[in-house]
Image (cartoon, rainbow, N blue to C red):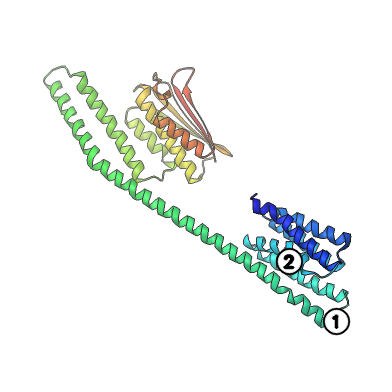
Amino acid sequence: MSRPDLLVAPIVAAVMVANAALTGKAGPIGYALLLAAAAVMHFHRRAPIPVLAATTGLALVYFLTVEPEIAASVPALIALTSVVRIKGRPYALASALTLILGMIAANLLAGQPPVPAIKGGFLVMGWYVAAMAMGVALLQADERAAEAERTREEALLRRAEQERLYIARELHDTLTHAISVIKVQAGVAVHLAKKRGEEVPASLLTIQEASGDAMRELRATLEALRDETVALARLPGLVERTRAGGQDVRLTVGGSPRPLPEEVEQAAYRIVQEALTNVTKHAGGAAAADVVVNYGNAELVLQVDDDGHGQAAGTPGVGLTGMRERVAALGGTLAVGPRPEGGFSVRAELPA
């Protein structure tokens, strides 16, 4: 709670007690009612509607048992503003009507003639109307601020999307062409060497393999840049592409599959994608990988295990760092490391 909010209750109490002292009519019961109303004001931000009900009731009792003094309803006026600000106008109207009628009844009980008593009650209506108008103004200010924030975020997202597309075009126009030429030339050289019955140099085979891997990773990067919106429904396609690259991958889905928040689905897809990339890079071509996606009631559990021989996947790098950042941003947990029986394991739990 901010410092201004902490000062509301003592300031309101001081104003009401000083006013009651000037009129000289409060007495012990009156001061107790005023202090109670001021104390309740401490919670007007966290529970505006209950505070409005309490302050309205205390002001009404003060009107009927002590005197019809508008200063006794200052806590209710502040609570009125807070309630209107959270779109609780029916509660605010009910409170204002209760206090106006209470003021009229108190005037009548004090012996005033009906016409002056009613007129006195309606004269204080302006206070309640002003409090409600203040609440409406604050509500509109909140809505304008929220709209400005949404507009700013949308503009940032548009700029980010344009930047992604620009990077994708540049990568496609430069790296893709260059790597394709290297791959084709290496393939032709390997073919000609085999055709002539010559031994193919190991360096040439390495170039051919590396260029193929680079092309696959570049395609995946371009796909991510051009379409950031990914979902778990695309996991079978990801698994099939990995299989097409020569890796044995099995996908198992457990629990009750259902649509999840977009940020959870994106993080889950990228985690599995990075884990399979690590399998391809480090586990060895003969390794098999199991991808398990389990939909729980409150969490989504992802596990990618392989039985390969590579340990390099356990070395902290950009891929694992990216996984940790995605999981941490969602408040989940991530465990990565070698398996006791051999191979490597990635397990992520995301709130669903």
**Where residue 184 sits in the image (x, y, percent)?**
18, 32
Please indicate whether residue 169 sits to the left or right of residue 119 in the image: left
Residue 331 vs 119, above or below: the answer is above
Q: Which amino acid type is marked by label 1?
A: Pro
Which disc, if any, is residue 40?
none
Please identify, in this view, whether the residue under mark 1 or under mark 2 is nearer the observer. Answer: 1
Q: Which amino acid type is marked by label 2?
A: Ser
Tell me if residue 147 can be seen: yes
Residue 251 vs 131, above or below: the answer is above
**Where residue 78 sits in the image (x, y, percent)?**
69, 62
Which disc, if any, is residue 113?
1
Q: Residues within 10 Å of mark 2 (few under 14, many from 20)?
A: many
Q: Residue furthest left?
A: 196
Q: Which residue is mark 2?
A: 95
- Of helix, strand and loop, which one carries label 2? helix
Q: Residue at x 49, y 59 (%)?
A: 147
Q: Quadrant of residue 231?
A: top left
- Seen from the viewer's position, the closer of residues 4 and 54 is 4
- Of helix, strand and loop, which one carries label 1? loop
Q: CA distance from mark 1 to mark 2?
A: 25 Å
